[in-house]
Amino acid sequence: MLDGIMMGLTTALSFQNLAMVVAGCLLGTFIGMLPGLGPMSIIAIMIPVAIKIGDPSAALILLAGVYYGAIFGGSTSSILINAPGVAGTVASSFDGYPMARQGKAGKALTVAAVSSFAGGTVGAILLMGFAPALSSVALLFHSAEYFALMVVGLSAIAAFAGTGKVVKALMMTVIGLILATVGESALFNAPRFTMGLSDLQSGFSFITLAMALFALPEALYLVLDPARGPAGGTDGEIKDLRITKEEAKQIAPVIARQSIQGFLIGVMPGAGATIASFLGYAVERNIAKGAEQAEFGKGSIKGLAAPETANNAACTGSFVPLLTLGIPGSGTTAILLGALIALNVSPGPRLMIDNPSIFWAVIISMYVGNLVLLILNLPLIPYIAKLLMIPRNYLIPFILFFTMVGAYIGQNNATELLILVGLGVFATILRFADYPLAPLLIGFILGGMLEDNFARAVNLTDGLEFMVQRPMTLGLLVLGVVLIFLPAYRRRRAKALQKGVAQGD
Amino acid sequence: MTRTFISRRVLIAAFAGLALMGAPAHAADKVVDKIHFLIPGGAGGGWDGTARGTGEALTKSGLVGSASYENMSGGGGGKAIGFLIENAKSNHGTLMVNSTPIVIRSLVGRFPHNFRDLTMIAGTIGDYAAFVVRKDSPLKSFKDLVAAFKENPRKVAVGGGSVPGGMDHIVIAQAMQAAGEDPTKVKYIPYDAGGKAMASLLSGEISALSTGFSEAVAMAKAGEVRIIGVTSADRIDAAPDAPTLKEQGYDAEFVNWRGFFAAPGLPADEAETYRNAIAKMYDTPEWEAVRARNGWVNIHNPGDKFTSFLEKQEGVIKDLMKKLGFL
């Protein structure tokens, strides 16, 4: 392995490849910041450039840089304007946006950058040390386990069910699950609930829904409720750019846990960054105690650090099945795989033997890339955060513009705009009625995968016995149920304690 | 929820399209001034790659002066077909790319139109289907798969990257029918992406995978799977070790074609000009570069040949889908 690392170092640190890392990261972050343009579309656009380069290591280093750069930058729009452009950064807006509204946009961006850096770097270390061994982990999960994992992911909604909102949160989740069933699923050869509209045949698109539920109501809310003041805080100052020592102490264990958990979830070909970020959020919220837990969803730095660490670690983790088995776990890695094949490299168990320099150079470039991203981003944060100081009558049209462009650009389909506005109005009404919208989006994102994996598992075992057939499925399902009911139990227990009932232990 | 139905074979196809346009080298005489390609799906998909790759070869070789591209997704491709038919008069300069699903989706009534409503230009490329198993699988040939199926069809799960009644399902049903088995008994497990189907094959969730030949070759090269049956008439050069279904005694052939259509009512001479340009494209080095890069197989069916080819495919698929209960 040492030989490999040395080989990777010499390849990755060549002038050309360093330039590739920097170029890829720069491009990735900037495009990732724009809502609507996820890593998938950027990488697809970059492919011809990569093929022109001809050298597979350089090409893959460039594309990988764009990939994690985009995930790195993707959190910016989530935090600043509540417009998650990538499913993997939805969870970052849960606490990132409230922080920005409290005038702590700079701090939120710093926390996001540091957590992303840590997640990516730990991921790269794990990838380097255990990639071949982890290839068998990637194949551990069957559809039954993925189904159970989605149930665990749904437990993230418990975070929004606090303070008398349990019914509202559950209602929103169910609406999300219902929306996920619209269109053709992978399992049935029939369009469902399309009301005869051909534009609904492929279902609702994630970006449109995210814009309609998060960014649009937020912008409209600011217009309809002028009392809320400018988005950047009343005095327009960017306060608290730095993370204090206490805060660092708070988030350090979160980052440590989530970089490993996120990485392992990323290794699973059917999971990925989105599931990793939701699970990270759910787990950290359940681990947090008392006041810290209550802060989740209202601007907790732990609540921001968890998904940001997890999604970057998962993004690195997704290279395990790609490089060691030739299996793309996500749309983005599928495009990377296609690029490699076009360059005459077949990823798989033989890659490490046949082309060790590519394998190691890519991993080494990930360390460099994460460092480059941190160095690039930290000095830029004050300027990016200043975006929010733009007067509201300019900022809101700007947000609306990006919302529209984001919804349109992925599909090139003007009907998306009508869906965006329709759902946006619906979401704004819900927002005024104080319904939490995040559970709706979580339900929508997980709903499709939940259903597909459930139906596959039923189909494979000809019944429901898959739930108890494999211990891993059962374990995950139990964990999911515990995570959903734990907060309610804790609240009851706390109440009981307040009343003076004797402590059980 | 929009799922990205991305399989490896689609992706392999996608890249040519994204290649940069070089300055046209006037190696060949210009046949058409310009072509506007209408792509019924988003950027980066299989249709997109085919249109852009063909456009690249046509312009670089000088057969066509310039090419433009328009992605129009919606309704699984139905929106673009409807657009081309409704705006036929103003779209004489437009070629729409499409493939086997147009036949399938028209049959199940997902589209109000079918290929007969359009002007048939030419089928240009294709990909055969293939069945793969894990390298350590006890199933060594398609005969073994059939034998296992005979024993207990519920124990033989065959996965694929399309919906039930979609292409990958139809191919395994067709092969099992050719083996004298009941195609409705096939336990078909659908996945929403080729990568996930492949992962489940390796993890042992399914016994065999029904997929595209180019994708199967890429997997076999990585050394994890074995191809036990190809739906071509003869063995293919790209994988000389992979046996065809035919040589194992199962008379089942299948081609997933890709080709181009024009607006209805296009004057015959204009249609002929497009066919001419495409026919000449096959001899150019520019096309060979694009084709090789994507692992496409040349299957050229111009004009009436295209129509009869599609009618024959429609017949085969229709019979099968009726048996499977989708029609």
Image (cartoon, helix red, strand yellow):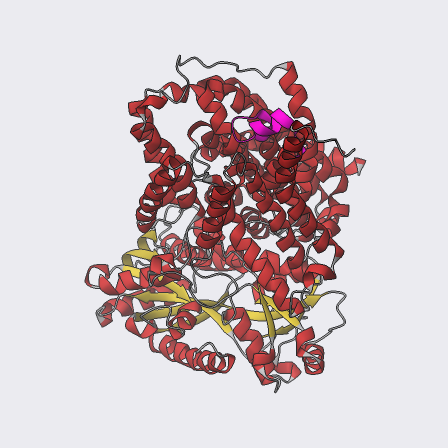
Q: Is A292 covered by the magenta stretch?
A: yes
Name, please, the residue furthest toward the left: B89
Closer-to-camera residue (A397/A163):
A163
Q: Residue at x 63, y 63 (%)?
A: A457
Rendered location of residue A424, percent (x, y)? 35, 42
Answer above or below: position of B148 versus B49: below
The count of marks equals: 0
Specify whether residue B119 is painted magenta. Answer: no
Q: Quadrant of residue B184?
A: bottom right
Q: Is residue A129 above or below residue B95?
A: above
A111 or A502, nearer to the observer: A502
Residue B152: give x, y in percent of width and height.
70, 79
Res A316 quadrant in image:
top right
Identify the image quadrant of residue A196.
Answer: bottom left
Q: Position of A78 compared to A261: left or right? A: left
Magenta extent: A286-304
Q: Residue at x 57, y 54 (%)?
A: A450
Quarter in which the N terminus of chain A is drawn: top right
Query: From the viewer's perspective, is residue B5 above or below residue A32?
Result: below
In the rendered image, is residue B233 in sight? no
Can residue B113 be seen here? yes
Residue A156's spot in the image, x, y percent?
A: 58, 41
**Quarter containing the C terminus of chain A:** top right
In this rendering, the answer to whether B225 lies above or below A341 is: below
Furthest-bottom residue in this view: B180
Q: Is residue A242 left or right of residue A385?
A: right
Q: Tell me where residue B44 appears, x and y as whole percent.
A: 46, 51
Q: What residue sits 48% from the left and 40% below the top?
A: A438
Q: Nearer the viewer, residue A389 or A427?
A: A427
The overriding secondary structure of the stretch rendered in magenta is helix
